[in-house]
Image: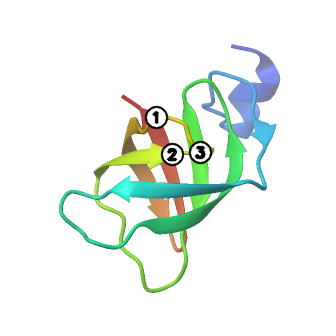
């Protein structure tokens, strides 16, 4: 680990790419309504999502990034207000 990452407390393993795209949480473990979220940034390991107010995202769910893509299994690794950190499983 570099001195810069030691000092800053940075724990990310991979580079982040800016988001700005919409994604849809399609299977929330029995919830009927899909949730449209904004991807704030993404990496090989996962995403940072902005979830609309009033929606709860369960710890495990299926996520579609682009229309026509197959859903990917994901899990929440942190929550801060309307932002959630998601890891691919």
The mark that comes first in sequence, 2 or 1, is 2
- Say which element carries label 2: strand
Quadrant the N terminus occupies: top right
State how far apart marks 3 and 1 are (Cα). Answer: 9 Å
Number of numbered discs on residues: 3
Q: Nearer the viewer, mark 3 or mark 1?
A: 1
Give the residue at mark 1. Answer: 70
Q: In which quarter of the image is residue 13?
A: top right
- Say which element carries label 1: loop
State how far apart marks 2 and 1 are (Cα). Answer: 6 Å
Give the residue at mark 3. Answer: 65
Give the residue at mark 2. Answer: 64
Q: Which class describes the residues within 10 Å of circle 1: few (<14), some (14-19), or many (20+)?
A: few
The structure residue drawn at horizontal position 24% and vertical position 69%, both measured from the top left corner, is 31
Q: In which quarter of the image is residue 27?
A: bottom left
Where residue 52 appears, as percent x and y from the top left, is 55, 77
Q: Quadrant of residue 14?
A: top right
Marks 3/1 in contact by CB < 8 Å: the verdict is no
Quadrant the C terminus occupies: top left
The structure residue drawn at horizontal position 56% and vertical position 41%, both measured from the top left corner, is 68
Q: Which residue lies furthest to the front in this view?
A: 68
């Amino acid at each position: 680990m570099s001195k810069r990452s030691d000092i800053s407390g940075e724990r990310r393993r991979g580079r982040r790419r800016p988001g700005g795209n919409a994604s849809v949480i399609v299977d929330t473990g029995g919830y009927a309504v899909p949730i449209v979220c904004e991807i704030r940034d993404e990496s090989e390991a996962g995403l940072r999502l902005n979830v609309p107010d009033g929606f709860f995202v369960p710890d495990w769910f299926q996520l579609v990034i682009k229309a026509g893509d197959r859903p990917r299994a994901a899990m929440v690794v942190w929550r801060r207000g309307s932002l959630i950190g998601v890891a691919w499983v």
